[in-house]
Amino acid sequence: MVSPFGLPLVKVALQGSTPQWLSFDTGATQTIIDRGWAEQLGFAIQDLGGSAQPGGRVQMGRFSGATMQLGGLDWPDRTFLAVALEPIEDAVGRPIPGIIGYDLLQSFVVETDYAKRRMWLHDPASFRYEGDGTILEIEIKGTKPMMPVTLFKRDGSAVIANFTIDAGSTQAVSLAAHFYPSVLTPDQVAVPARGWGFGGNQSRGLLLRIPRVEFGPYAFEEVSSHAVVADGTSGKRRWDGIIGGELLRRFNVIYDYSRGRMILEPNDTLRDPLRESLTGMEFVAEGGGSKAVVVYTVYQGSAADRAGVREGDLLGALNGKPVTSHELAWLWDRLRAGVGDEHHLRMRRGDAERHVALKLERLPLTH
């Protein structure tokens, strides 16, 4: 298992194919395979029509009779969804030929160790936990694992909310459209933001900082959080927000749906600073990282904003190294750690090229 951006990727094979890195996503209702890969392997795909997803409508298909190989385990006779996954490739900067979802979590006790880069699948009937981690009660609503999370507001008051656990999110915390106004106070600073949705379009939102987030015995201070305003879907979500990979990567996480629990064993990164954009820019890699790295968001008042960087600018090099020779995670990691460090970027807008020096700083989201 590897985890660029805090996104767990697991190497698996389908029908004896060359192994590929698939995303493991507790927020996915079912395992999804890239439609092109499924067709290449000879599966007959039944079209299911369009489905409203964050980022726009997605054409869904389905195929049956597949065997997935996970390590030395065969997971036979599976029915998977088939969806074109190129939009995710742009957001992550590498091919994502599939997303492993709820059906695996329903079948096994799944253990993801971010520090050791390993995933284990346990038989629920024989699994016995003998460690000293924290056992949290979760509720499976539909296909989503839910737990209570306490958020503290700027005025010191607390809100208890129902959050879903989403290993497929790179955020620390995301807030649903119906819920985020309940954590705002009159002195709350929030700036416009955009997210990259599953449907390939950008969702509109706000970026704000929550003073404190608690679940179980764990607390995180001054958490940069994305509040969704509109994401291409309609209707009220069954959850108030999301706990994502930026928090989950700090643990060995055991998902035991059969017993309604999640077990957290902290690793050495538990108290590391929460990663966030320290330049005030967010990027996508058009063509999965092989063509161009494009700025799709610049946060108001950030270092990038003050330096004149704008949405649509192209990033050519970081400290003299061409960014297209690296995965997007390489760039992401270097610009989200090291407050006070200075980086030199080569940018292009149209035919004009310029060099920008940016000192990394936390976004100005508090008074």
Image: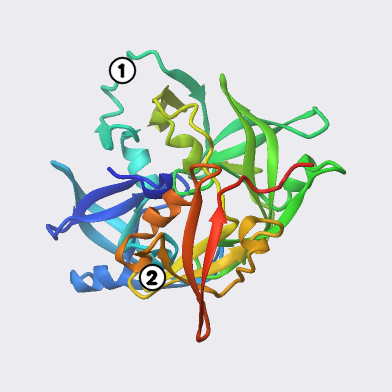
Left or right: 59, with 205 as reference point: left
Q: Position of residue 20 (x, y in %)?
A: 22, 57
Q: How is the image coloured?
A: rainbow
Place residue 87 in its image quadrant.
Answer: bottom left
Identify the residue at horizontal 80%, vertical 28% (top origin): 157
The local crowd at label 1, few if under 14, some if 14 to 19, many if 20 or more residues have their Cα within 10 Å, is few
* Image quadrant containing the N terminus: top left
Q: Position of residue 90 (x, y in %)?
A: 42, 67
> Residue 128: which disc?
1
Place residue 358 in its image quadrant.
Answer: bottom right
Residue marked by disc 2: 86
Q: Nearer the viewer, mark 1 or mark 2?
A: 2
Identify the residue at horizontal 49%, vertical 41% (top origin): 246
Secondary element under disc 2, as helix, strand or loop, is helix
* Image quadrant containing the C terminus: top right
177 to 159, vertically: above or below: below
Q: Amino acid at mark 2?
A: Glu
Q: Amino acid at mark 1?
A: Arg
* Residue 140 visible, this angle: yes
Left or right: 235, with 98 as reference point: right
Q: Nearer the viewer, residue 261 or 165?
A: 165
Left or right: 183, with 165 as reference point: right
Q: Position of residue 270 (x, y in %)?
A: 46, 27
The mark that comes first in sequence, 1 or 2, is 2
- For marks 1 and 2, give the CA distance: 40 Å
Q: Nearer the viewer, residue 74 or 100?
A: 100
Secondary element under disc 1, as helix, strand or loop, is loop
Q: Position of residue 128 (x, y in %)?
A: 31, 17
